[in-house]
Amino acid sequence: MRQMAKVILAPVALVFVLSGCGGPKAFTKGEYDDPTRVELLDDKYNEADMQQMADTIIKSIVACDYVAKAQKPPVVIVEKVQNRTEEHIDTVSLTDKIRTSLIKSGKVRFVNKEARGLLDEEYKYAEEGNVSGPTAKKKGKQTGADYILNGSLATNVQQVGNDKFIYYKLTMNLTNLESSTIDCTDEREIRKKYRKRSVGL
């Protein structure tokens, strides 16, 4: 009976061993990495592309005469960068990065368009008598925007033999709300080349 039990248990044990060796392994050990280091791990849009594009746009807008020579920092509404590529790209992060850096420059101020609904709720809450008079904020005192900052990210992919070329272009415009003229504009282009890896047996 013991001999039969050994015969039955042996294949079962082998299955557990093989499943442990061949199954997916969890990432259990990590370390901090330099976010500025460029590593092209695949042929997708990455954080290095975003950094390069954001830096170009930020420097261009800050140096633009309508911003650099303004008597006081112009007030801007920022719209999310439109994704006109076939990739799933987090353009919200790209938009936030541009806005954050521009605010830190001290050359531009931003209206928080996304918070308008919350502001209306707070105004209503104050009007209902829930906030003490001296501290209650009222409608009609918000700062109007001078500009709208918007743009789009486009791409073009070409494959020739074993070579793949990926071209990205970010275009951003600073549009004057009063005159509807584009007072500042710039674009950043990135072109990357990949070679198909040969698979050996």
Image (spheres, rainbow, N blue to C red):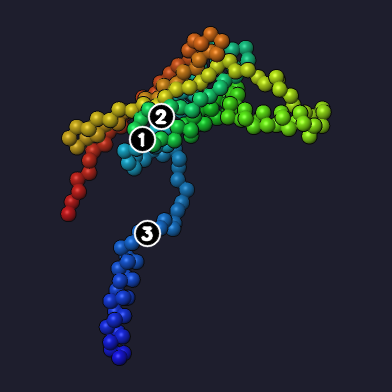
- Give the residue number, with chain letter if any, for mark 1: 87
Q: Earlier in the sequence, mark 3 or mark 2?
A: 3
Which quadrant of the figure contains the C terminus? Answer: bottom left
Q: Which of marks 3 and 1 is in front?
A: 1
Give coordinates of residue 52: x percent, y percent. 42, 29
Badge 3 density bin: few <14, some 14–19, many ≥20, Cα 10 Å = few
Residue at screen point 72% across, 30% down: 124
Label 2 crowd (10 A; few <14 / some 14-19 / many >=20): some
On residue 83, which mark appears?
A: 2
Q: Distance between the residues labelled 2 and 1?
A: 8 Å
Where, by quadrant of the figure, is residue 159 drawn?
Answer: top left
Q: Where is residue 87 in the image (x, y as percent from the top left)?
A: 36, 35
Label 1: few (<14), some (14–19) or many (≥20) C-alpha neighbours in 10 Å: few
Tell me the kind of residue under disc 1. Glu
| Label 3: which secondary element | loop
Residue at 20% in and 48% down: 199
Q: Are marks 2 and 1 in contact (CB under 8 Å)?
A: yes
Q: Tell which of 182 and 115 is nearer to you.
A: 115
Q: Looking at the rendered structure, which numbered label has been put on residue 25?
A: 3
Please tell me whether mark 3 or mark 2 is closer to you in this view. Answer: 2
- The answer to which of marks 3 and 1 sits earlier in the sequence is 3
